[in-house]
Image: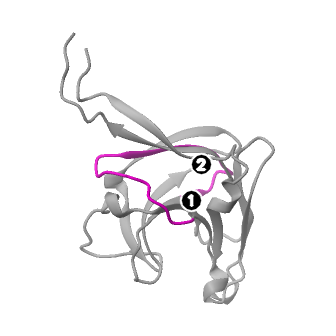
Amino acid sequence: MMSCDEKTERLLFNFADARAAKEWRPVNDGVMGGRSDGRFHITDAHTMEFFGTISLENNGGFASVRSVPRTLDLAANDTIVLRVRGDGREYSLNLYLPDRRMAASYRAKLSTAKERWTEIAVPMKEFVETSFGRVVPNAGPVDAAKVNAIGFMLSDKQSGPFRLEVDWIKVRSAADHPSIQD
């Protein structure tokens, strides 16, 4: 018997493909005069490592990495599921839309355990709209169908080195079929 409560998962990003590095790019506070250094590379273990140093100089304080825009086919009831190994710091999981507004994204908190792999599930309803790092008041939910990029950001106002390793990113959707009884 299958019910509409069943979930299906679809892989959005893995890092085993030789082209994986071309699907991501860093964006750091240097775009606003800051001095943080955030980079990424694909490891021999086929993970993406996002690493660097946060600097609070020149009103800086953030580093990020994001996927290049492409169709992700997300829906409002989807959940983003990822496997990460962090450094104990709190990152943001960001969703981007093809919007002309500067520094706009939808964010959800992403807590990491120091040097331990963790699987994290973030429902679409947990993402809040932000602009320049501040929550946009009275904003509606993310229009999941328009999301065309995903990313990770560290902006915890703590200077120093950081490291986040990502094994894979999936989307979990409610099954789109009615109840079927055998």
User: Which badge, 2 or 1, is on the more N-terminal residue?
Assistant: 1
- Residue located 45% across and 84% down the image: 102
In-front residue for pair 112/26: 26
Where is mark 2, residue-wise? 112
From the viewer's perspective, is residue 70 above or below residue 136?
above
Q: Quadrant of residue 6?
A: top left
Indicate yes or no whether the magenta region holds residue 160: no
Please provide the residue range marked out in magenta.
Answer: 68-91
Query: Where does residue 63 sit, x and y in percent of width and height?
Result: 64, 71
Helix, strand or loop status at disc 2: loop
The three-letter code of the residue at mark 2 reads: Thr
Q: In which quarter of the image is residue 145?
A: bottom left
Q: Which quadrant of the rendered structure holds the C terminus?
A: top left
Mark drawn on residue 117: none
- Total count of labels: 2
- Residue located 73% across and 66% down the image: 39
Where is mark 1, residue-wise? 91
Q: Which quadrant of the rendered structure holds the N terminus?
A: top left
- Residue located 40% across and 83% down the image: 101
As drawn, the residue found furthest toward the right would be 44
Distance, label 2 to label 1, CA atoms, is: 8 Å
The three-letter code of the residue at mark 1 reads: Tyr
Indicate yes or no whether the magenta region holds residue 90: yes
Label 2 packing within 10 angstroms: few (<14), some (14-19), many (20+): many
Query: Where does residue 35 sit, x and y in percent of width and height?
Result: 72, 82
Q: Do the residues labelled 2 and 1 touch (CB within 8 Å)?
A: yes
Q: In the rendered view, does 117 fall on the left or right side of 120?
A: right
